[in-house]
Amino acid sequence: MIQANDSGSDKILLKKVGVIYSSGDTAITALDGCSLSVRANEFLCLLGPSGCGKSTILHLIAGFLEPTSGSVLINGRKINGPGADRGVVFQQYNLFPWKRVAQNIEFGTRLQILSSEERRTIIAEYLELMELTGFERSYPFQLSQGMQQRVGLARAYANDPEILLMDEPFASLDAQTGLRMRELLLRIWNGKQKTIVFVTHDIDEAIQLGDRVVIMTRRPGRIRKEVLIDLPRPRPKDFFLDSKYAQLRATMRSVLLDE
Amino acid sequence: MRRLFLNEIRNWSSSVLGIATVVCVLSFWQLLSHWRAYDVHLVPPPGVTATAFLEMVKNGEWFIDVGDSLARYLVGLLIGCFSGVMLGLLTGRLQLLRGCVAPILDFCRSTPLISLVPLFIVLFGIGFKEKVLLVGWGVLFPVWLNTQAGVLRIEREYIWVAKSLGVSDNRLYREVVLPRALPFIIAGVRIGIATGFFALGAAEIAGAFSGVVFRAYYSHQMFRTDKMMVAILTIGFLGILCDRSYTFAMARLVPWWKENI
């Protein structure tokens, strides 16, 4: 188990974070004494049943939410709201329906400061990577759900944040596209050195992608177990034939089912 | 492709059905009068109404009425929409201001417009200005309230995504908050188009000497029920025309509007 500590090498650090959502008389403890550290350039997967506070952790790191207790640090400094250094991909409400595909992708500030020519190159590059070439002038409502999700991914990647926060980004894609998008994500992560926090409820996805998988308990969310995925990278397409994989999978399953 | 074609047929056939129904109702009405089922002097049949219409077109009366009414209506509509959107954006954004004007807003929009006609005449005198302002008043509130709701109801996810892309407050307002409110504003203006006609009606029954609603009242007093029917049908037709051209234009100008967000 990796202990969260104060050392400067942590890209993201959660120290005994508690989050209580209160509305009227009812208060729900979403997170309770949650400590977690993510190294720079690490690919971390958060795994757990729905309602376990995975997304809450993501929202804390993104700066959408302030912890009720404890603190959240990025590069050793306290977070002050959302910023372009931390890109997000949600499952829903990703795209602005009033902007065309290309306008959605170029919305990020890091693209806005570039010359229009550089911007066009980057947009074309991501359109091609996401298999969206020819749709740059379409509105989101004219695209399938899977295509919309790919535009959301393109926009997050194109703004080139140091940290990518992803909330089940491939859940709405068909199996084949999901496979390609996972490979692409790994390629981008490899090439550009990003820190990724990836929320999922899919054990296989977590093992395929992560350096480390953090398994959470049902509400109130606590960290139950951390599993190091010491499978070699790049992971071959048949990584699931590896006996180590079967072992990891069995461990995680038993932790999740133990709930 | 096939579905598109079917939709086309469905749209086309529904408008044909609509027109067919109108023709049926008019024929039935004509038959009723033919059978003397009611006093035709009180409510003239379509044939007599059509003759009256031709007479009014020939002597130019119809064009003057429609022109005067439309001028009052359209200028008032513009004023009402513009001020409604501006006020809605302000009160949508500034919570303090919203709290301050809420009681006045509620009072004004629940006061029947027709009871305000004397006040407007006292304030602005009888004439074009008073009538335009009455129409503007009728349009103002639905536009204002819808705009305000549109600004307030924005999903937090849109704001989150924009801020995570590093967008400044100014761009956030212009490129996210405003466009998100646009479907609400479009709906508000559509209601305003209808309430504007109510207001025009109120404005033209007192202190008017021309206009379609004036014509209906005046003809009634002169026992010219045929001309009264022409005026009533004209105002209804103008209402439909305005609403249809507005939704037609919006569907083309804002293609993403109807696709729900």
Image (spheres, rainbow, N blue to C red):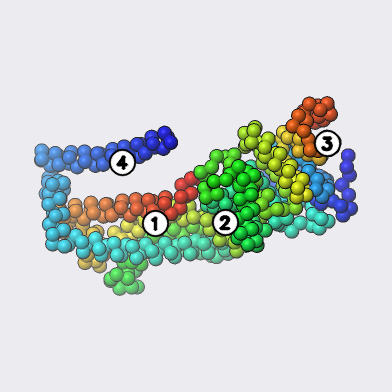
Residue B60: where, in percent of width, then height?
Answer: 16, 62
The chain ID associated with circle 1 is B
The chain ID associated with circle 3 is A
Q: For the residues marked 1 and 3, what is the alpha-carbon distance in whole angstroms?
A: 65 Å
Q: For the residues marked 1 and 2, what is the alpha-carbon distance in whole angstroms?
A: 24 Å
Name the amino acid type tagged 2. Answer: Val
Query: Is label 4 in contact with label 2 (beta carbons under 8 Å)?
Result: no
Q: Which residue is mark 3?
A: A232
Q: For the residues marked 3 and 2, what is the alpha-carbon distance in whole angstroms?
A: 43 Å
Residue A179: where, in percent of width, then height?
Answer: 68, 35
The chain ID associated with circle 2 is B
Find numbered disc 3 in the image and state the secondary structure of the residue it sits on: loop
Counting other residues with Cα less than 10 Å from the Cα at mark 1, is it few (<14), some (14-19), or many (20 or more)? many
For residue B15, which numbered disc appears in the image?
4
Q: Which residue is mark 1?
A: B192
Residue A220 shows up from this direction: no
- Position of A59 relative to B83 (above/below): above
* Among the two numbered marks 4 and 2 on one chain, the one whose residue lies closer to the N terminus: 4
Counting other residues with Cα less than 10 Å from the Cα at mark 4, is it few (<14), some (14-19), or many (20 or more)? few
Find numbered disc 4 in the image and state the secondary structure of the residue it sits on: helix
Find numbered disc 2 in the image and state the secondary structure of the residue it sits on: helix
Q: Residue at x 63, y 62 (%)?
A: A115
Name the amino acid type tagged 3. Answer: Pro
Q: Residue at x 34, y 65 (%)?
A: B75
Which mark is nearer the camera, 1 or 4? 4
